Image: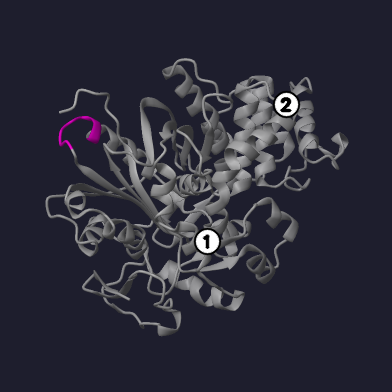
Amino acid sequence: MSSGPVTVGVEALDVYGGSAWISADDLAEGRGLDRARVKNLMLSGRSVALPFEDPVTHAVNAAKGLLDDLDPAVRDRIEVVLVATESGVDYSKSIASYVHRHLELPERCRLLEVKQACYAATAALQLAAGYLASGASPGARVLLIATDVGLADERAEYAELATGSGAVALLLSERPDVLALDLGAFGLHSFETMDTARPGPDTEFADADLSLVAYLECTVRSFADYSRRVADVRLDETFDHLVFHTPFAGMVRAAHRRAMREFTGLDPAATAADFTRRVEPGLRYPAQVGNLFSGSLYLALAGLVDELPATARESRVGLFSYGSGCSSEFLSGTLGETARDTVAARKIGPRLAARRRLGFAEYRELLPYGQACLLPRRHLTLDPHPEWRPAAGGRGPLLALRGIDDYHRRYDWI
Amino acid sequence: MDHTDGVVLAAIRAHATAILPDLAPADIVPERTLAELGLNSVDRSEVVTNVMDDLDVLVPITEFRQAMPVAELVVLFERYR
């Protein structure tokens, strides 16, 4: 084993932001929502699931290209598959088992699904980092995927515009070409609350006021805990960039304002300028995809890295993760000189731009499928829906749900 | 609204009008909710957390509910002041 300092983090990442999307303006017009308020959400659109998509296909489709491009010897070292989701399809059998099968991962592998609302991926990331840093299995890789299907419909009012569907895949290792975690530098804040929940497969409960206050307070209190653990930290100076769990950009702006008010002496104008400089670059992809739940923070991270200038040197990023219920964490890491090229190779921005744009009528036709795919069924034969298949040119293979036999989900590549 | 010196209401008024300059402090009356006064959910959460910060009051977050009239917010802050 090497005697140097232990370094672990994100070796590669990729995003599946859906194959279809609707613009926030078109959706707001269809629902008769106030355009001025839509502007506050700072949202251009949201991804929409196709009839043959579910949390399993999203997860596999997020990781497939990244894994296909890996050196087979590296791929063979994937020893842990973690799937973070609040869109589970079975109380016992994990989505990780389907993901493991359809990505053809090694049999010498640990599989686990994790749940803590939108904080689940960060909790899993930290547990994986501890495993990788322990030296228990030098050279091991962990595949962590955050995948979710949004349930919001017209009953959610403005939240419908901000709720996406998709997945983010992170390959974690001792070779963090994208993000090297600052091991030991973290702050936590958790307490029981009923702000948002999914009490049933297609049922969502939300108290928006409670959830937003919890989010804002957790931002401040988790950073306060970080400052207690890490010497000489200043919110306005220690981090070159800040990325947040992004239910919608307006929420992130409020959290940034709240934290800057608490921890710095900056006036509102200087705080707004700081937001533009350090936070806005990370909002680019969430604004096109909507809230990806557990994946949302890492979607923001991907957007930030894709916005880094070509001349970027190593920089430090602070990350705030929040999951209803609630558990939260402020953590940090460094983006190395290889981060930009590693993420750019995934072509996340061009793939988001190539998604099919839906009209309101098409969107309404698709919406029920997003909820139906989570319902427990013994048998289901899914219409192959050729009219919704993304055109074959210029894209990799996509996994699609074909049906369910005796509760067993069956998939095909299209 | 008993046993209040008006400090909490003044702080709510100050932060609500800072966010919505069209609002007059006198519009913010105890029986209305902040939503009825035109503050969206993000605005409301900022008012509540800024008031906690200003008055150095730590209200357990689980005590907040959707659609609380201003009077109920004042009572809540007073309970933990």
Mark nearer the viewer, 2 or 1: 2
- The answer to whether residue A358 is left or right of residue A199 is right
Q: How far across and how far down the image is residue A93, in percent?
A: 23, 57
Q: Point out the image quarter for the C terminus of chain A.
A: bottom left
Residue under numbered circle 2: A267
Q: How far across and how far down the image is residue A378, in percent?
A: 26, 73
- Which residues are the magenta region? A132-138
Q: Point out the image quarter for the N terminus of chain A.
A: top left
Confirm whether the magenta stretch covers residue A134: yes
For label 2, the crowd category at 10 Å Cα-Cα, with few meaning under 14, some 14 to 19 and many 20 or more, is few
Please say if A289 is above or below B72.
below
Please say if A212 is above or below A33.
above
Question: Distance between the Cα atoms at labels 2 and 1?
Answer: 37 Å
Q: How far across and how far down the image is residue A240, in percent?
A: 53, 32
- The answer to whether residue A337 is left or right of residue B20 is left
User: At x 43% / y 31%, what residue is drawn?
Assistant: A332
Amino acid carrying label 2: it is Asp
Amino acid carrying label 1: it is Ala
Q: In which chain is the residue bearing label 1?
A: A
Helix, strand or loop at label 2? It is loop
Q: Which mark is residue A152?
A: 1
